[in-house]
Image (cartoon, rainbow, N blue to C red):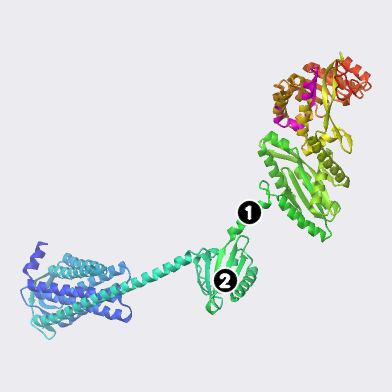
């Protein structure tokens, strides 16, 4: 490095070195500016300015070389070979021009870097050819490492110069020009330092040689040209920069204005909540928004511009998985319908593209036959409307048609049957034991049963058959049919579905149903009559334990009419206090002393005379009057008994419906308080059938009543269930042996054995037994022999009013 510095300072004329550096800087700036200018142009002008840039850098390198050579003082004067000198100039222009081609016509950093490296090769090639153009004698020796360093310096620095020059702004131009100047100078002076001229000497001039003076003139001219080129390049670059700035500013302003307009338009179109389309008079789409593609389920990048309305309809329908032949036909019909609508001035139409897509399409005509179309997706609105309609017409729990919807469907079926040859069967279905399921396992279990049965009924339906839920555990159905076999098959399917077992948790719930059938037109000509008659048949089926399906008969209507009339009269009798009470004596079998009286109700029905309780009590239970009747009997009997001179016990019957009501406890407590009757004088009689209906609840209510001091008797024992578990579950105060066993007790050994067994059971449980229906002395004797505690019947006294005025002891008036 020290020898290179010594070589530079002592072997060169500093003035020429400075001149060489100036020439190099001017040419480098001109090259960089012209290169950038050419890169911005297109077409033929790019090639013209590319050539000017190549000449500028070529001549600049060449001039820098020979000015620097003139500054070199080896101790003798140089002369130059004209041919090699020209070749060196040509090499500088061509090779550097090739590098500039990569830069000007390239587009990436790699092209710029490679082009700059080629320029470096041109600088090195020009220099060593220029050294070869020196005419001198002796031997020129070279330092290989310095030669390599010079070539690498030229290539690397030239590549960096071009990379910097292609950057933005004047900083890029300045840095590029400085690096290119450094590349040329570093390459030249490093190469000159690599040459050893100590063994060289001058030669005489020849015809093919030029001396240094002439070359100096040529270099001066070239330098002036380079200076002019540099100044021109500066002017051009500045003009380009200003023009580019103006164009960019104008383009930016235009772009901003267009963007603003586009943004406003896009905002307006986008914010429209429906699809928008502008069609020309030829039916082809001119403008549309993206919302239209979304509504039609078309790809977001699909361009519909220029497509005819029919083609757009075809594309939209194709998304609904229709066959292609159907799609084309439907698209044609749809397009024709809307083309006609739009050409008539516009209008609105509702179209269903598919099962789940419903569109509201509006057309508005504009000038020239064109029109604007808006498309709104109302599918969700329609689904909501359908859901609301479905909720209004279907049962929320089971999904079956409710009463209103069933009536509508039945009316339609009746109109069809009226105009055709089919009969129509209307069917009433009522579940058996459903209340017990609810009371035992809870309403959730009941709902589970209803849902399962509804699903089963839905599965068995065939064309024309309908099932609906019209009440809590009530269903209705209808079926058009032409022969009875078809009807019987439908009824069999219903019966099989409702009769079975439904799994629920760890248990299986047993289900069953009673089915009534009424047939149009024989059993009724309108919906109301058919449903009513089907209900009558269903109730007949429910009353008959051996029959699950019952067809309507005209006698049922008369029977039902009579029961409805009786129900009205029962309510009237309650309002008018038309019921009366009678008492039947109960006596000790061993002593014949009075032990109490059973309270019995009587009704003299206007126009009919006396009506047996066995006839009107079931009707009272059906019409809901039994609770009121039971309360009246209890209140009246306690009030009358409290006024008796003898403190005999009274026995009052309690129905199963009363026993299911917890309010019975409060009513007994209130009646005892109001009447003043001692609780031990009141005995309530309940049948085992009433207990079994809801055993857990019934026994709980009876225990509460028993805590009041009231005694409890189980009535009609020996019939019905006669479950020993009932006696075990509750401490009854008395067992009443049913009258059916007394009719043959003196002649039939089997009846006597049953009576004997029940009496033994009572003794083992320490519960007294009272035998009902004792009508003969023989019957009474049997009871005495078998150890019965109490008895009642016609032998001991008929039911009647008690008259205390004639007897100090109890007497009866028949």
**Distance of mark 2 from mark 1, alpha carbons?**
30 Å
Mark 1 surroundings within 10 Å by alpha-carbon count, few (fewer than 14), some (14 through 19), many (20 or more): few
What percent of the width, then of the height, locates residue 693?
75, 32
Please tell me the numbered disc located at residue 388: 1
| Residue 539 lies within the magenta run | no
Start and end of the magenta stretch?
Answer: 639-665
Q: Quadrant of the N terminus?
A: bottom left
Mark 2 element type: strand
Q: Is residue 505 visible?
A: yes
Mark 1 element type: helix
Residue 320 higher or lower than 718, as above or below: below
Q: Quadrant of the C terminus?
A: top right
Q: Residue furthest bottom?
A: 207
105 sits left or right of 543 in the view: left
What percent of the width, then of the height, locates residue 452?
70, 44
405 sits left or right of 276 in the view: right
The answer to which image quadrant residue 441 occupies is top right
| Residue 646 lies within the magenta run | yes
Tell me which residue sits at (14%, 84%) in the image: 208
Mark 2 surroundings within 10 Å by alpha-carbon count, few (fewer than 14), some (14 through 19), many (20 or more): many
Nearer the observer, 384 or 800: 800
The answer to which image quadrant residue 88 occupies is bottom left
666 sits left or right of 204 in the view: right
Pick whichever of labels 2 and 1 is earlier in the sequence: 2
9 sits left or right of 258 in the view: left
Nearer the observer, 400 or 247: 400
Residue receiving disc 2: 363
């Amino acid at each position: 490095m020290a020898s290179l510095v010594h070589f530079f300072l002592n072997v060169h004329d500093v003035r020429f070195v400075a001149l060489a550096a100036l020439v190099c800087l001017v040419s480098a700036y001109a090259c960089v500016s012209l290169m950038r200018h050419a890169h911005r142009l297109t077409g033929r002008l790019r090639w013209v300015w590319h050539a000017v840039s190549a000449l500028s850098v070529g001549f600049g390198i060449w001039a820098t070389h020979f000015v620097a050579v003139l500054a070199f003082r080896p101790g003798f004067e140089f002369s130059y070979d004209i041919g090699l000198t020209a070749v060196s100039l040509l090499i500088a222009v061509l090779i550097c021009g090739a590098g500039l081609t990569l830069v000007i016509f390239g587009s990436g950093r790699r092209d710029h870097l490679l082009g700059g490296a080629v320029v470096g090769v041109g600088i090195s090639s020009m220099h060593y050819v220029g050294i070869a153009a020196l005419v001198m004698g002796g031997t020129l020796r070279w330092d290989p490492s310095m030669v390599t360093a010079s070539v690498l310096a030229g290539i690397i620095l030239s590549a960096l110069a071009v990379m910097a020059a292609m950057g933005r702004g004047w900083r890029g131009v300045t840095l590029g020009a400085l690096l290119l100047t450094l590349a040329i100078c570093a390459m030249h002076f490093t190469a000159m330092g690599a040459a050893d001229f100590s063994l060289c000497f001058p030669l005489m001039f020849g015809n093919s040689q030029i001396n240094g003076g002439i070359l100096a003139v040529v270099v001066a001219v070239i330098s002036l040209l380079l200076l002019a080129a540099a100044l021109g390049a500066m002017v051009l670059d500045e003009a380009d920069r200003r023009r580019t700035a103006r164009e960019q500013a104008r383009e930016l302003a235009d772009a901003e204005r267009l963007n603003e307009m586009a943004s406003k338009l896009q905002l307006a179109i986008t914010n429209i909540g429906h699809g928008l389309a502008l069609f020309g008079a030829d039916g082809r789409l001119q403008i549309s928004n993206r919302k239209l593609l979304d509504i039609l389920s078309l790809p977001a990048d699909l361009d519909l511009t220029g497509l005819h309305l029919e083609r757009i309809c075809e594309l939209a329908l194709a998304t609904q998985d229709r066959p292609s032949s159907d799609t084309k036909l439907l698209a044609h019909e749809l397009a024709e319908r809307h083309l006609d609508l739009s050409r008539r001035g516009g209008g609105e139409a509702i179209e269903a593209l598919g099962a789940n897509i419903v569109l509201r399409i509006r057309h508005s005509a504009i000038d020239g036959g064109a029109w604007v179309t808006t498309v709104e997706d109302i599918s969700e609105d329609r689904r909501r409307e359908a859901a609301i309609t479905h909720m209004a017409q279907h049962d929320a729990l089971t999904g079956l048609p409710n009463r209103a919807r069933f009536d509508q469907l039945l009316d339609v079926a009746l109109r069809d049957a009226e105009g055709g040859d089919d009969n129509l069967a209307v069917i009433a279905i009522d579940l058996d034991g459903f209340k017990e399921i609810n009371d035992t396992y809870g309403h959730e279990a009941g709902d589970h049963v209803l849902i399962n049965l509804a699903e089963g009924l839905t599965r068995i339906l065939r064309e024309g058959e309908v099932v609906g839920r019209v009440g809590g555990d009530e269903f209705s159905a209808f079926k058009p049919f032409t022969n009875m076999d078809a009807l019987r098959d439908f009824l069999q399917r219903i019966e099989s579905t409702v009769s079975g077992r439904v799994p629920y948790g760890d248990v299986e719930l047993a289900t069953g149903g009673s089915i009534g059938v009424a047939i149009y037109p024989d059993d009724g000509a309108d919906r109301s009559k058919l449903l009513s008659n089907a209900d009558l048949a269903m109730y007949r089926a429910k009353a008959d334990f051996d029959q699950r399906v019952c067809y309507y008969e005209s006698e049922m209507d008369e029977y039902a009419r009579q029961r409805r009339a009786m129900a009205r009269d029962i309510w009237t009798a309650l309002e008018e206090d038309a019921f009366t009470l009678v008492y039947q004596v109960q006596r000790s079998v061993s002593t014949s002393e009075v032990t109490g009286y059973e309270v019995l109700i009587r009704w003299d029905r206007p126009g009919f005379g006396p009506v047996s309780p066995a006839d009107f009590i079931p009707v009272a239970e059906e019409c809901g009057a039994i609770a009121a009747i039971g309360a009246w009997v209890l209140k009246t009997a306690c009030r009358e008994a409290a006024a008796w001179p003898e403190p005999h016990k009274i026995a009052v019957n309690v129905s199963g419906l009363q026993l299911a009501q917890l309010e019975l406890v409060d009513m007994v407590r209130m009646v005892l308080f109001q009447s003043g009757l001692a609780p031990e004088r009141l005995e309530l009689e309940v049948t085992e059938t009433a207990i079994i209906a809801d055993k857990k609840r019934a026994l709980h209510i009876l225990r509460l009543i028993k805590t009041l001091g009231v005694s409890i008797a189980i009535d009609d024992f020996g019939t019905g269930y006669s479950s020993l578990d009932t006696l075990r579950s509750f401490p009854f105060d008395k067992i009443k042996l049913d009258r059916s066993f007394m009719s043959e007790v003196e002649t039939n050994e089997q009846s006597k054995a049953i009576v004997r067994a029940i009496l033994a059971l009572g003794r083992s449980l320490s519960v007294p037994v009272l035998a009902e229906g004792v009508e003969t002395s023989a019957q009474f004797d049997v009871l005495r022999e078998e150890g019965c505690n109490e008895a009642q019947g016609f032998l001991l006294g008929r039911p009647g009013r008690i008259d205390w005025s004639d007897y100090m002891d109890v007497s009866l008036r028949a």
